[in-house]
Image: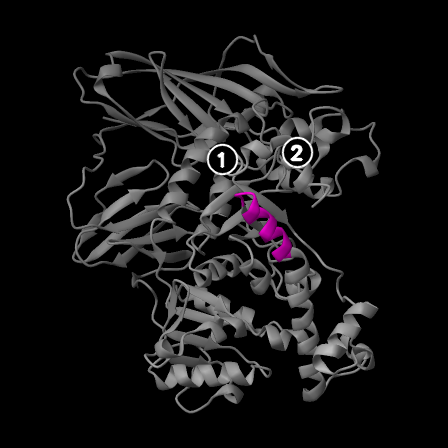
Amino acid sequence: MDSTHKKYEEYIGDLFGDTVTAVFCDEPTAPRPFAYRKELAEEFLSRCGIDIRLYLPYFFNDVTPDEKVGEIMIQWFEFLSEIFCKNFLEKEKRWCEGHSLQFLGHMDKDDEPNGWLSGGNYGAMRALKVMDVPGVDVISRQIFWERSEYSAKTSFFPRIASSVAAQKGSRLALTESFAVYGNGLTFDQMRYVINYQAMRGINVFNPMLFSYGRRGFLRTGELPHFARSHACYSDLGVFNRYLERLSYLFSVGVRKTKVALYFPQRDMYVTQEECFVKIGERLEKKKIPFDLISDETLRLAPEGELEKGVLRVGSAAYVTVVLPPCRYLSKEGEEILIKFALGGGEVICTDKENVRDHYHYDPTLSRLLPAVTFIGDADGFSVEEIQTKDRLLFIMNETKEKKVCRVQTEGKPYLIDVTFGEIKKPDVADGVCTLTLCGGEIVALFYAEERLPVFEPLGRTERELTSWTCRPKERFFIAKEDFVTLCCHKKERRVRLGDWRRYLGRGFSGRAEYLATFDLPVPVNGLTLELGDVKYTCEAFIGGVSLGVRVMPPYRYEVGADLLQRHNQLVVSVKNTVANEFRYTGAFRKYKKYQMTQYIKRERKFQKSSLPSGLFGPVKIFF
């Protein structure tokens, strides 16, 4: 704190609480995988009357613990968790409070079931509770379209932060996302990563990162680099507007989460088993939103609410608790669950050994019904609900391809198109709403009593534009000591839509313009322009007037009649990522391995998927 916080205070302390609103604590870590020192052992002996030195072999898996030793191991790790919070996190929190700042951040290894140990915090839920805004980290394709060796070990791990937030009575949970995703990261991919987390309760978004430097080997630092010179990343502001809408919609009310999955932290102190992960994945597959709870969560529930069958902590109110196999549930926690069940709450055990009177044994979770009823294929879709004075039901397509889903609905909801910020009338017939979603797209069904103005799409007479020319306009270079963007003066040439590497070269990163003309019958009341597949951002012009920037599918524009003539010129300005230049540059050959980021091989591997570039189409107009 002397070397960071107080130095910031010295230089920008007058901005605290106004321009500077928070301190971000990134991956605070105690010694791992095992913390031990003389002072800790003496304090533990004083508190618990146990000489921990006698039990050290059990912590290193040299000896299998029996139940008595298991309880001692639990006591030790809970002691370390308390000390970690008291001696580090709580001190930083008090400093922030004294300087009108919020305290926020995330733990290390938060995607791992045993991250409490490998991440050096000894209890992530307890540690995150100290923070005003608890968070998670998404790095190196832990969340991505396809599963890989880099995927998160716990697919639903963002729920750890949103659960803690709800149990603190807060609506806010954050993510730090995109570090080590590589400079081929597209806004379409970014939307998927963010939306996936939003559907699990995250609503404050911190995109990573700014370049470590524009000169020398610092340019190879963790990628992507969001910089104006970096081709499509100059359009980051458009994506930020999307994040604003998403953040607002997911924080305007309280998450309607009635199911809690017990996180067997005490068991994992001893056995490190991960059986609860499969239970969480089963809940997600059944379209059941849920939070994680710990023994500490159980102890905080008011007894009066338990007698009514409600486990209420903060703004969370659970009526169902799912209990995975666990051997070391505390006696106090078990007594609380029994009171909860006697009051009418539902305790579902997935293991026979945990079944008690008034509990239900249901290893397949068949007793639990999905948050919304799908008609037909529901694979790849997820559901989240926000309760305001009205109801917001979010549906996401978590696959890579465009998909259609049909859900049962009561009444006639409005459809919020989060991508464009438009309110529409959905396709509803006989109590069934039909939705068509791009890969990674979220929409919301909004059940409002008042009548709202809605967006009406234009006509559907279809024509495909097939005659195109193309010309490069700007090229991004990695020069010897800096990033450079140069204007291109090549003549336009006739092209077929598709990968521009055929015309502009495999290493071209930058911007190119596509031109086409079309005739219309006059008058028309406007048209819809659909560009099909674009890699990766674009700005369209008709008659020299910009129709706006699009950074992710659908690449669609609604064009008013005032911009249209009998003869019209369409210009589509397309930017790709800087992956092509980073892939083929020779500027980094002179640097030593130790000078460049440890992730550079992984980032290069990721960037390969983003090398195809340009306007792929088909481009169609509807009038």
Q: Nearer the viewer, mark 2 or mark 1?
A: 2
Q: Residues within 10 Å of mark 2 (few under 14, many from 20)?
A: few
Q: Is residue 96 magenta?
A: yes
Q: Which residue is mark 2?
A: 10
Element type at mark 2: helix
Which numbered disc, 2 or 1, marks the residue that appears first in the sequence? Answer: 2
In the image, 307: left or right of 504? left
Q: Please say if 378 is above or below 65.
A: above
Q: Residue 554, how many percent across, how many down?
A: 38, 36
Q: Which residue is mark 1?
A: 18
Tell me where the magenta segment starts and ends, as one range.
Answer: 89-101
Q: Residue 136, how many percent across, how many down?
A: 56, 53
Q: Residue furthest front?
A: 98
Which residue is drawn at the image coordinates 45% and 76% (left, top)?
A: 322
Q: Residue 345, how many percent across, how many down?
A: 36, 79
| Three-letter residue code for mark 2 | Glu
- How far apart are the two marked residues, 2 and 1, measured between alpha carbons? 16 Å
Mark seen at residue 358: none
Which image quadrant is residue 72 in? bottom right
| Front residue of 545 and 341 | 341
Which image quadrant is residue 564 in? top left
* Residue 367 visible, this angle: no
| Three-letter residue code for mark 1 | Asp
